[in-house]
Image (cartoon, rainbow, N blue to C red):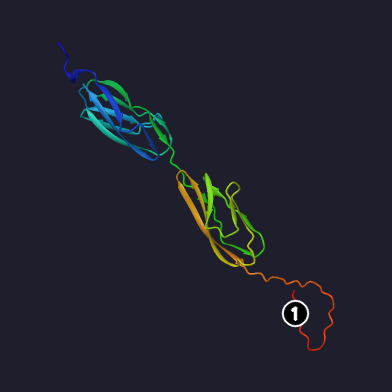
Amino acid sequence: EELSEDFKKASATLTGDKTSCTAPCTVEYKLELKDGKGPFKVKYDFNNDGTIDENVTVSSKNDTRKFTYNSAGTFTAKADVEDTSLETKVTASAKALTVSAAAVLPTLNPIGNKTGNENSLLEFIISCLNCDSTSASNLPSGSTYTASTKTYSWTPDFAQSGSYSVTFTATNSAGTDSETITITVNNVNVTMTISPSSNQNIDAGDFINWQS
């Protein structure tokens, strides 16, 4: 005579609702039992490190649990099931879960405002953390930014005194970080040079035109 399902050893299936995600991520696991009598003691090890994450007793043949993964890695959740009435045990393992590390935003180190003089070189280097590239926008005429060395360089001419806003940006796959600084160029008086000329003799009342 065939045994009823209550007297058969239980079989178990554990299924997660995803097989890959980016930390932190929460996965819902469903445990489905077939046969057995119960109640069932279930020990869950979600990150397969040998420690029990949840220890529960269920009467039904279905159980749902959620677990949050905060670090990157590959994990195979496992459920050890004991049928307390029949004193039998069974283990169910879910498909492997791959958790990727969360992308980190770039950080542009503080640059601060800069001051220079007309006809004098103003040059500085910017720096950043977790950045794939850098750029500069709204550059004053004659100034340059070299991304390969992260170097800004400018020699303002004698007509460029004033204040200028320049934006520097660090970029990676996660996003950007920017800082807008003010560059102040001080006015510098131009030194006039008069070329020597020979002595000139003129009569009283004559007009002389002298050009420097």
Q: Tell me the kind of residue under disc 1.
A: Asn
Residue ranking furthest to the bottom: 205
Left or right of residue 102: residue 9: left
| Side (left or right) of 54 relative to 182 | left
Measured along the vertical axis of the image, is residue 122 above or below residue 4? below
Q: Nearer the viewer, residue 4 or 29?
A: 29
> What x and y, as percent, mark residue 59?
21, 29
Residue at (26, 33) in percent of width and height: 64
Residue 44 falls in image quadrant:
top left
Residue carrying label 1: 209
Q: Can you give x and y, in whole percent of width and height, for residue 210 in the image?
A: 76, 78
Q: Nearer the viewer, residue 5 or 126?
A: 126
Instruction: Decide: few, some or many residues near mark 1? Use Cα within 10 Å; few <14, some 14-19, many ≥20.
Output: few
Residue positioned 27% across, 31% down in the render: 30
Quadrant placement of the N terminus: top left
Label tally: 1
Query: Which residue in the rendered view is the most extreme toward the top?
Result: 1
Residue 34 point in image, percent of width and height: 22, 22
Residue 20, image x, y percentages: 37, 33
